[in-house]
Image: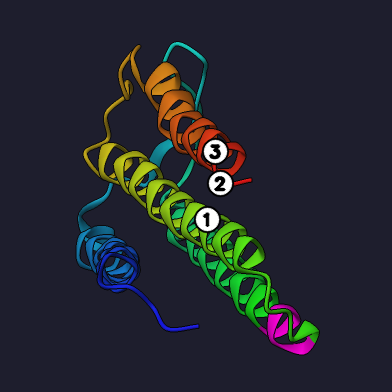
Amino acid sequence: MKLAKVDKIVETIGWFVILSLWALTIINYHQLPEVIPSHYNETGTADDFRCKSTIFLLPAMVTVLFVTLTFIMRFIYISYNQIHTTDNNVLKQLSNAIRLIRYLKVIIAVVFGWVTYQTIRCSNDVGVWFLPLTIALLFVPIVYFIIKSFKQQ
């Protein structure tokens, strides 16, 4: 399956966010105080603090998630190609699933990026809007692609 232009753009944005997140973390590491926020509660307030080396957990976790989801997408492609189906609807549904995963990868990277940025700023607050916005950012594409999937049946 050939990637559409929008898929290439979204994938590129995702990798750019991941690389930027690592660069931001590495560049700012030495300027961090010895103790930084390590967890934010449901209201966006820091409720746990750890040594500054834990800042590397954020880009590491998002990289693992991003690469794992990329692997899952590739696995879906390989599985599809082994089936050799000619059903056009299956191809549309597969494309929807892959595009949803691609969007979710970028959203996850951006969310982790925001938390990393706020942690580097040593902010004790990511904002009361952080959790509701994150949930919306994750569920809006899921709902959109579910609706799109039903319309294509």
| Pick the front one: 22 or 37 | 22
Q: Dot 3: few (<14), some (14–19), or many (≥20) neighbours within 10 Å?
A: few
Q: Position of residue 116 (x, y in %)?
A: 34, 46
User: Disc 1 or disc 2, which is closer to the eye?
Assistant: 2
Magenta highlight range: 78-82
Identity, as a three-letter code, of the amino acid under mark 1: Asn
Q: Where 74 sits versus 49, above or below?
A: below
Q: Do tag 2 and tag 3 residues touch (Cβ < 8 Å)?
A: yes
Residue under circle 1? 96
Secondary structure character of the magenta stretch overall:
helix
Residue under circle 2? 152
Mark closest to the chain's N terminus, 1 or 3 = 1
User: From the viewer's perspective, is 72 left or right of 7?
Assistant: right
| Pick the front one: 150 or 112 | 150
Q: Where 138 sits versus 21, above or below?
A: above
Residue under circle 3? 151
The total number of labels drawn is 3
The residue positioned 42% from the left and 83% from the top of the image is: 2
The residue positioned 33% from the left and 15% from the top of the image is: 129
| Pick the front one: 107 or 3 | 3
Q: Dot 1: few (<14), some (14–19), or many (≥20) neighbours within 10 Å?
A: some
Quarter placement of the C terminus: top right
Q: Position of residue 36 (x, y in %)?
A: 39, 39
